[in-house]
């Protein structure tokens, strides 16, 4: 604790931390200025889920249906919860996505902090500038694009668990569960299996049985991939709005 207090008292470190919050503050203003509580083109699949939920006609097949070629089950579940609890308030969903994005950035910076505190104040601002850039405006003001935030957070959290729970079965199981959820969050979630494998290999992970890290990951990844292919339905392509 004393070391952290001494670190934050140094002018260079204070300046770096404060500068890192500037892009985030501007993004908050940007979202507040431009978000709307109406579905956009890429949100129309979620609109179908919302309407069926409200009318009581929602089925499991609807949740498993792909949106523009991707399974987005966590996003659909969030929409279902929003319909029941908030009468489908898209602004709340946007706020939830934003919170996940901030948590992802915080987790990433935590890893940098634990790795090398000396470079942390110099990394924080450029990383924040890239991560919270308003150039990727659709990711911030359209609910559907929030699936990217789910995937990033789940993959990063899974890798973090592997790093900080070396050779512990519970940590590995939790990381595998998170990666499965990421896989069903968006097509890009499949990348999590490779990230998980690399995290295990670079951290000298050895599971307490005969399996090696590659075998453990593949035994989970292959069935999940096959399930995704079996559940795949024709892609939903929204028309002009």
Image (tube, grey):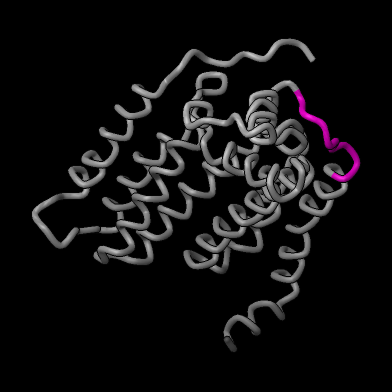
Q: Residue at x 66, y 57 (%)?
A: 124
Q: Where residue 196 sits in the image (x, y, percent)?
A: 35, 47
Seen in the picture, residue 12 relative to 42 is either above or below; the reply is: below
Q: Where residue 148 sits in the image (x, y, percent)?
A: 58, 37
Q: Residue at x 77, y 29 (%)?
A: 39
In the image, taking residue 16 as reference, residue 210 lies left or right, namely left
Seen in the picture, residue 43 relative to 134 is either above or below; the reply is: above
* Quarter of the view holding residue 138: top right
Which residue is outermost to the front? 56
Does residue 156 show up? Answer: yes
Which residue is outermost to the right? 33
Along the viewing direction, whichever of 189 and 57 lies nearer the viewer: 57
Which residue is outermost to the left? 210
In the rendered structure, which segment of residues is drawn in magenta?
A: 32-40
Name the quarter where the N terminus is drawn.
Answer: bottom right
In the image, taking residue 22 as reference, residue 199 lies left or right, namely left
Q: Residue at x 73, y 58 (%)?
A: 20
Does residue 187 show up? Answer: no
- Magenta stretch mostly in which secondary structure? loop
In the image, taking residue 115 as reference, residue 20 lies left or right, namely right
Q: Residue at x 21, y 43 (%)?
A: 214
Q: Where residue 10 sits in the image (x, y, percent)?
A: 71, 77
Name the quarter where the C terminus is drawn.
Answer: top right
Along the viewing direction, whichever of 83 and 211 lies nearer the viewer: 83
Which residue is outermost to the top? 239
Along the viewing direction, whichever of 52 and 238 lies nearer the viewer: 52
Q: How many marks?
A: 0
Determine if the magenta segment contains residue 41: no
Q: Where residue 76 sits in the image (x, y, percent)?
A: 58, 36
Seen in the picture, residue 168 relative to 155 is either above or below; the reply is: below
């Amino acid at each position: 604790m004393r070391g952290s207090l001494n670190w934050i008292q140094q002018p260079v470190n204070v300046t770096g931390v404060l500068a890192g919050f500037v892009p985030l503050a501007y993004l908050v203003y940007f979202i507040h200025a431009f978000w709307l509580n109406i579905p956009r083109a890429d949100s129309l699949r979620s609109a179908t889920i919302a309407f069926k939920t409200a009318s009581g006609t929602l089925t499991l097949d609807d949740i498993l249906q792909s949106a523009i070629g991707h399974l987005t089950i966590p996003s659909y579940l969030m929409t279902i919860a929003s319909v029941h609890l908030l009468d489908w308030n898209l602004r709340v969903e946007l706020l939830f996505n934003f919170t996940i994005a901030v948590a992802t950035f915080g987790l990433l910076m935590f890893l940098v902090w634990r790795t090398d505190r000396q470079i942390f104040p110099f990394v924080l601002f450029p990383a924040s500038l890239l991560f919270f850039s308003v150039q990727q405006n659709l990711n911030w003001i359209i609910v559907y694009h929030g699936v990217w935030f789910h995937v990033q957070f789940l993959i990063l959290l899974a890798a973090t668990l592997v790093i900080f729970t070396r050779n512990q079965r519970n940590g590995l199981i939790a990381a595998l569960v998170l990666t499965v959820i990421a896989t069903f969050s968006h097509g890009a979630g499949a990348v999590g299996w490779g990230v998980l494998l690399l995290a295990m290999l670079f951290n000298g992970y050895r599971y307490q049985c005969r399996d090696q890290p590659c075998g453990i990951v593949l035994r989970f990844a292959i069935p999940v991939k096959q399930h995704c292919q079996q559940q795949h339905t024709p892609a939903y392509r929204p028309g002009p709005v």
